[in-house]
Amino acid sequence: MKIKSVETWTEAFKLTVPYTIAFATIDAVENIFVRIEAENGLFGLGSASPSGKVTGESYEACRQALAENLEALVIGRDVRHLAGINREMNSKMINTPAARAAVDIALHDLLGQVCGIPVVDLLGRCHTSMPTSVTIGIMPPIDAVASAKEHIANGFKVLKVKTGKNPEEDIEVLRKVREEVGAGIRIRTDANQGYSLEQTRLFLETVKSLDIELVEQPLKADEISAMLELPGDLRKSCMADESLHSPTDALKLAAQPQPFGSYNIKLMKAGGIAPAVQISRIAELAGLDLMWGCNDESIVSITAALHAAFASPATRYIDLDGSLDLERDLVSGGFHLQEGVMTTIDKPGLGFERLV
C-alpha cells in the first residue's frame, strides 16, 4: 500500500492547570502533527512533543527535520515496509527523536489500518488494561493534598508527585499526601534530576517509611557513576528517565551493576514506537521493569505509547496522563479511561474516532 501524500502542522495547546517541575513552570505547549495518506485514502496520524530538556531538540529543529526529510522518506514507499523506512529515517534525523516519533507513530497508525487490526496486536499484545498515574506538580503541602484528593475523587488510584527542588520540603509534601490518602493509594515521585548524591541518599532513606513505589531520575542524566555509589536497594527503587533515550542507552544501563531498577520509556525520547519496543526488549532480558511516560501531548502520541506499553511483558507501570490537561485536542478516541484505568480501543490502527 503506497504512500501518496504527507502533511505537517503545529498546534498550540493551553493547559487547564499550569504546573511546576524541578526546572520549569508549564502553562502551555505546542505539538507538531504529521498526517501520512496512502493511495487508497487511509491516513495515519502522528504527533511530536519536542523538549530541549527531554528530547534534546527545539520545536524549530523538529519542524525543520520534518520539512527537509519527510516527503523524501515516505512518498511512494509501501507502508508495509515500515521497518526499512524507520531505519533510513534514523540515519537522516539522528538528533530529532520527537520528529522521528511523529513519523513512526503515523506509519504505525496507517499500517494497522491497512492490516485491519490495532497497532498493539501488530506488536504482540500482552496487557489489556492498566492504571495510569496522574501528576501533582511541585506545590506546598496543603495544595498537594487538595490536588491528591481531587484526583482520587475522579477515580485515580496512582499519584505521581513532582519533587526535586528541596528534599526536606519534598519529604514533607509526600508525608502529608500519604497521611491524607492512606495506604490504598500508590504514590510515585519524580525528581527530574533535581538532587545531589547526598540529597538523593537522604531522600530515599527517609521515604522508605512512606511506601513510595519508585523515584524517577534523582540525579543529573549523566551522573551514572554517582548513582552506583548508592546501595543496591536504593538504586533498585530508582527509575531512569532523562538518562535513557535510545536502545544504546538501555544496553549501557542494563549492564551490571545496574544504576537503576527500572526504565521510563517515552516515545519522544526514543524516536517512536519501533525503538521504544527495542528498549522494552532489552529491559525484559535484563530483568528491569518498565514505565511508559509522556510529556504534555496529544491523544495521538499518548495512544501510541499505550499500544507499545501493552505489547511489552516488562511493562509494570504507565504514566500516560499527558493529554488530560490539554484544553483541547485534535482527535478523540484512542483509548478509554475509567476510574484511572486505561484500555485501548478495538479499532484498526490507533483507533482515533474523529478529527475535531
Image (spheres, rainbow, N blue to C red):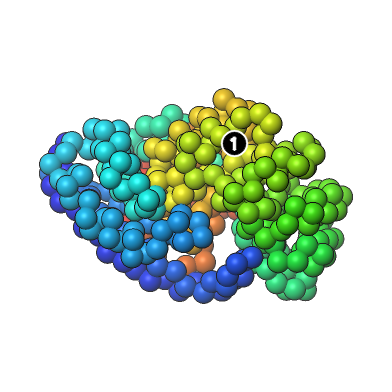
Instruction: State whether residue 225 is above or below residue 60.
Output: above
Q: Is residue 180 left or right of residue 124?
A: right
State the residue at coordinates (61%, 45%): 240
Question: In terms of depth relative to the viewer, which is nearer, 203 or 323?
Answer: 203
Q: Residue 166's x, y, as percent?
A: 75, 66
Q: Residues within 10 Å of mark 1 (few under 14, many from 20)?
A: many
Q: Nearer the viewer, residue 16 or 3?
A: 3
Q: Left of 88 or right of it: where is 127?
A: right
Compared with 316, 163 (above or below) is: below
* Residue carrying label 1: 253
Three-letter code, disc 1: Leu
Residue in view at x 61 percent, y 30 percent: 255
| Quadrant assignment, res 121 | top left
All told, the count of numbered labels is 1
For the question of whether residue 67 can be seen, the reply is yes
**Residue 238: x %, y % from top left:** 70, 45
> Where is residue 221 drawn, in percent x and y?
59, 51
Q: Is residue 59 left or right of residue 313?
A: left
**Residue at point 33% right, 35% down?**
117
Q: In what quadrant of the picture does the N terminus appear?
A: top left
**Up-down relation of residue 186 to residue 113 (above or below):** below
Q: Quadrant of the C terminus?
A: bottom left
Residue shown at 26% from the left, 55% from the top: 66
